Image (tube, helix red, strand yellow):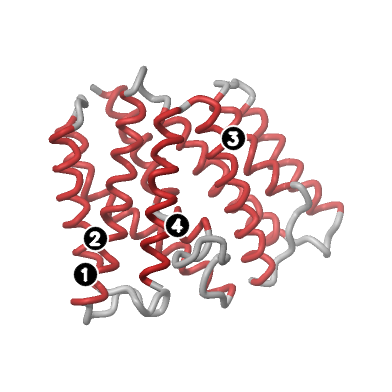
Amino acid sequence: MLRQRILTSLVGAPLMVWMAWLGGYPFLVTTLVLSVLSMMEIRRLIVRCGHRVFPVFLEVGSVFFAVGVFFQSNLIPGFVVLFIFTGALTCVGRYPYYTFIDFCVNGMAAFYVGWGYAHFIMLRNMMEGMDGFWLFAFALVVIWGTDTGAYFTGRFLGKHAFFPDISSKKTWEGFIGGVVISFICVMIYLYFVPMGNKTLLIVLTPLLSMLGQAGDLFESLFKRQARVKDASRILPGHGGILDRFDGALWVVPILYQALALYEKVV
């Protein structure tokens, strides 16, 4: 299990960094692939939880947001309104086959995955030139440092359960270890990388690390309700795409929005 986890990371991590380095269409395609695969996994979880899936609803959501922000489209607000009303009308027209709960679950999944991955594009393109790449790479350092620190600290030192009703393997020691190791990784990263606002990024790191672990717990909650161990088995040693990027779907959007707010206020 650990060997598969390491081998998968040794292949997947450099590939993700390379696509982010290239930016542009290669990174857009990478983001869309991740979004579509994640949506397929969340679709399975929705069915396993006993809810019905709206046809095409999730698939469109997994693609449109990332494409919209890539081309800086002003159609996104209009699409959101159309998206909501289309789902509501589908619910009305097919009741009781589709219920209000089905509508809420499908809508949440579409925004959680589609809008979450769209922030990958937004963060990568937030600064001109390669500064956007260094910023996105910073997010990866936080996420991977947190995951690695939490995994090994929890495995060797973990004794006190952390939200055992959601995930029996999570411990307080692992939680703290994830925050500490991610902070150390960020300090090393920022020492060598030419970036501005380093102080702000350092201050945000512990918060992002904790929120990344909250994202992990959120996905674990979904899997617990669906009674499955992994979202899928596409990544040996890791499970599914959602299992690998559950923290990123919290860290990247929150980092982007925090920096956007900082720019407006300061």
* Direction from residue 197 to residue 217 in the image, left or right: right
Q: Which residue is mark 2?
A: 178
User: Callout 2, which amino acid?
Assistant: Gly
Q: Are marks 1 and 2 in contact (CB under 8 Å)?
A: yes
Q: Quadrant of residue 148?
A: bottom left
User: How far apart, in angstroms, are the residues tagged by discs 4 and 1?
Assistant: 18 Å
Q: In x, y percent, where is residue 181?
A: 19, 56
Count neighbours of disc 4 (C-alpha within 10 A) and say few if under 14, some if 14 to 19, many if 20 or more.
Answer: some
Foreground of the two, 61 or 85 = 61
Q: Which residue is mark 3?
A: 65
Q: In x, y percent, where is residue 246?
A: 45, 56
User: How far apart, in angstroms, are the residues tagged by discs 1 and 3?
Assistant: 37 Å
User: Callout 4, which amino acid?
Assistant: Arg
User: Callout 3, which amino acid?
Assistant: Phe
Q: Are marks 4 and 2 in contact (CB under 8 Å)?
A: no
Foreground of the two, 194 or 210 = 194
Q: Quadrant of the N terminus?
A: bottom left
Query: Which label number is shown at residue 153?
Result: 1
Tell me the SS state at disc 4: helix
Count neighbours of disc 1 (C-alpha within 10 A) and say few if under 14, some if 14 to 19, many if 20 or more.
Answer: many
Q: Which residue is mark 4?
A: 244
Asked if 146 appears above or below 263 in the picture, the reply is: below
The first of marks 3 and 2 along the sequence is 3
* Of labels 3 and 2, the one closer to you: 2
Q: Quadrant of residue 5?
A: bottom left
The first of marks 4 and 1 along the sequence is 1
Q: In x, y percent, where is residue 106?
A: 66, 54
